[in-house]
Amino acid sequence: MAGGTKRLPRAVREQQMLDAAVQMFSINGYHETSMDAIAAQAEISKPMLYLYYGSKEELFGACLNRELTRFVDTVRAEIDFRQSPKDLLRNAVLAFLNYIDANRASWIVLYTQATSSQAFAHTVREGRERIIDLVARLLQSGTRHPEPDTDFNMMAVALVGAGEAVANRVSTGDADVDEAAELMINLFWRGLKGTPSEKEKDGSSLSLQQNAQ
Amino acid sequence: MAGGTKRLPRAVREQQMLDAAVQMFSINGYHETSMDAIAAQAEISKPMLYLYYGSKEELFGACLNRELTRFVDTVRAEIDFRQSPKDLLRNAVLAFLNYIDANRASWIVLYTQATSSQAFAHTVREGRERIIDLVARLLQSGTRHPEPDTDFNMMAVALVGAGEAVANRVSTGDADVDEAAELMINLFWRGLKGTPSEKEKDGSSLSLQQNAQ
Amino acid sequence: MAGGTKRLPRAVREQQMLDAAVQMFSINGYHETSMDAIAAQAEISKPMLYLYYGSKEELFGACLNRELTRFVDTVRAEIDFRQSPKDLLRNAVLAFLNYIDANRASWIVLYTQATSSQAFAHTVREGRERIIDLVARLLQSGTRHPEPDTDFNMMAVALVGAGEAVANRVSTGDADVDEAAELMINLFWRGLKGTPSEKEKDGSSLSLQQNAQ
Amino acid sequence: MAGGTKRLPRAVREQQMLDAAVQMFSINGYHETSMDAIAAQAEISKPMLYLYYGSKEELFGACLNRELTRFVDTVRAEIDFRQSPKDLLRNAVLAFLNYIDANRASWIVLYTQATSSQAFAHTVREGRERIIDLVARLLQSGTRHPEPDTDFNMMAVALVGAGEAVANRVSTGDADVDEAAELMINLFWRGLKGTPSEKEKDGSSLSLQQNAQ
DNA sequence: CATGAATGAGGTTTCATTCAT
DNA sequence: AATGAATGAAACCTCATTCAT
């Protein structure tokens, strides 16, 4: 009789639910989190979850989307694309790792849990592709070849993979953000020099650097 | 051929069960694979699974161990550690990616599904650490500083992450082994040059380093 | 009439479930009664049982507690402790045996089935001790020595054992309540006179005692 | 390769199995003891159990019979029926409680576990009746009314119940044999004086005592 | 709008029991 | 005679999901 029956505007309720869901999913994983647990965490009743999100799968999907969007938006917002490639790289890596460090639950939901159920392979892959594309464009922005190139993409895959691994260490507290950033910047910078269009002319990596400025 | 009622020696049955379990787990994931499905795939009865492995969790653990051991053993066996660093790297990357290409189910079980249940975080992390150590030693073998170094380890983390990402593409058929290998070799080779002990001596690296700041 | 889908307040459902559980447990015993059978008897679904009571063991424990409480409360309520010892005894024995006669299922659950699983040894023993204490106080109330005495307790153990045996006959319909009551009253009355504090004074008891040695 | 395949004569094997079964049943109860556990305890294979005893139920029945027979035989053998009633009583009670004390497992199997499954209600009840009859005859032997009497039987029921209760305390180590014996002797002796044929002539209990000698 | 009450369906696990050697 | 290997059947329990209020 006391509490719980407050009327809240839809938007507030939605965030309240997603917050609870993200938290529980990231702690216990998709399959090991029950709708009961989420409802309890959100301090609402289970039917509300179903009213707003239809099913557990859709709820998780909504979590995924919100977190991914937040992530991409935040990181992108912090990047100033008008910088020199080197500064751009540093800027991007720091934006990325700082986001991870500040939003550990999100990251785990996005990359660790989502992969477990095939239902989200699509969403996760799509999200990852968006990031990979971002990185690929970053790589490409330092060259004279602006058209899409599968090799840039492949290098981006590798670098994003490296980034995920490093980010995982950060998210578990096993790595210091600044150290990790330095390493990633280094790796990316060298990766940048290993992109295909440059391969043919060895020693041109320097010129790339210079051209980029 | 339907068989099932044949008396098989313990060792044979064990492999038969693990084969079935690895296959099902890698297709549907840990939580979405029922013991019924595994028993059906192995053409045996469910109690056999429990007789041999005790529980679903232990069965998955056994899969993990077998596949990880196979993986590490096979890759290590293909590497000739007496080669020059560059050949060693090429050799190792190819051994790795070829194994992935030839054992897609194993790889997915090991790295994608295992993470979904917290029960295996330990095992997976441990396995990954073994690989990271392997890579770290590989990196270090190209230097004159044989003692362990946390920076080598961190670089190995990143490179293994890159390797996992690339391997995932390979395992899904979205990337060609040779192309992927070439890229990884390049990335690793450049990563190698960015490792701490070289920072002070490699002139080009140094200049880059200085420029970066 | 089949019902089942009616919304009942929690308290009602609880009793409905306990009624069904007590009945089934007392007919078939703890281990030979399945949760399915209890759910069917209660005309509800199995998850309700688990929702309300958590596990089969806890459900049985709840049965035990309810029946024991009912038993103790009812018997105690019928006893007027201001009577003379002899009337008190008659009153108590009749209250006890009448309760047994009127609640055969309860009795069987309490004393016969509960012992079968070690999980309830504690509860059963505790319940029995409460009754033994009641009897011990009853015995003692006929003496001038109100302080606790282990010999009173031991005599109570024996008399309660006798009572259980007689009650079992009553509960199976193999004994008439009034006959059984008469016998128990006799036995208890004589037992009363054999309690330690009286040993020294009752001449005949004394001689018996001496002869016995 | 080492042991286990010894050929033993049937009689020896039978005892070996029953020993193991009695031990396990008395420790864990009928339902909570698996055939596996019994086979392991007996250091033979499960099919042997089935070859010799057909089913778990029959095996338990065999345990029950052996233990009950042993019990009745041993106690009866220690009783000298030519003694005076008082000595006879003392003799019998001590024989009984000493047997319990020396064979705790047997007792628990017989009285505690057997009751849990309806399959043995018959056997247990039958065994108990044999003991009750023994006691009834004992009671009656002290009177001039040698013909069967339901009231003697009822008193025997009560006294045996008391005996069981006391014996249970002994079997759990919560009561000293000698103390318990003294109490039971007392109770029985007084119970003896409360038997029906004596009820009509009050004060004649003493004469019974005297007549009995 | 919000929820307590209720369930169908399916999962893991165990056990008594039997076959083939 | 003796057993390792194998299983049908059923138990307990949980969960996503939906009514009826």
Image (spheres, coloured by chain):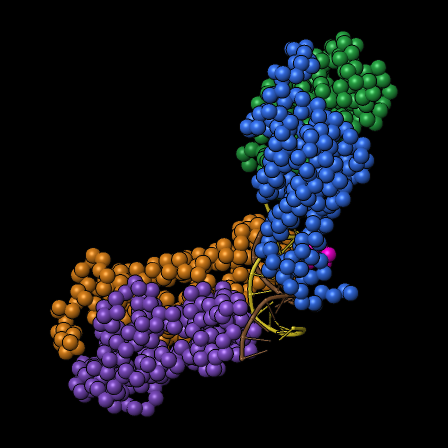
Chain colours: A green, B blue, C orange, D purple, E yellow, F brown
Residue D142: image x %, image y %? 24, 86
Is residue B105 placed above or below A145 in the rendered structure?
below
Q: Measuring 20% from the left and 58% from the top, which residue is drawn there?
A: C146
Q: Which residues are magenta?
A: B37-41
Image quadrant for the C terminus of chain A? top right
Is residue B9 in sight in this rendering?
yes
- Front residue of D65 and B161: B161
Residue D125: image x %, image y %? 43, 78
Is residue D25 in sight in this rendering?
no
Q: Measuring 59% from the left and 42% from the top, which residue is drawn there?
A: B123
Q: Measuring 73% from the left and 56% from the top, which residue is drawn there?
A: B41
Image quadrant for the N terminus of chain A? top right
Quadrant of residue C157 within the rendered picture: bottom left
Q: Measuring 43% from the left and 73% from the top, which residue is drawn there?
A: D19
- Front residue of A16 and B68: B68
Residue A115: image x %, image y %? 70, 38
- Front residue of E3 and C49: C49
Is residue A143 placed above or below A101 in the rendered structure?
above
Asked if residue A48 lies in the magenta stretch, the reply is: no
**Residue A65 appears left or right of D47:** right
Residue C189: image x %, image y %? 25, 71
Is residue A20 placed above or below B18 in the rendered structure?
above
Q: Main secondary structure of the magenta part?
A: helix
Q: Residue furthest right?
A: A147
Quadrant of residue B42 within the rendered picture: bottom right
Badge count: 0
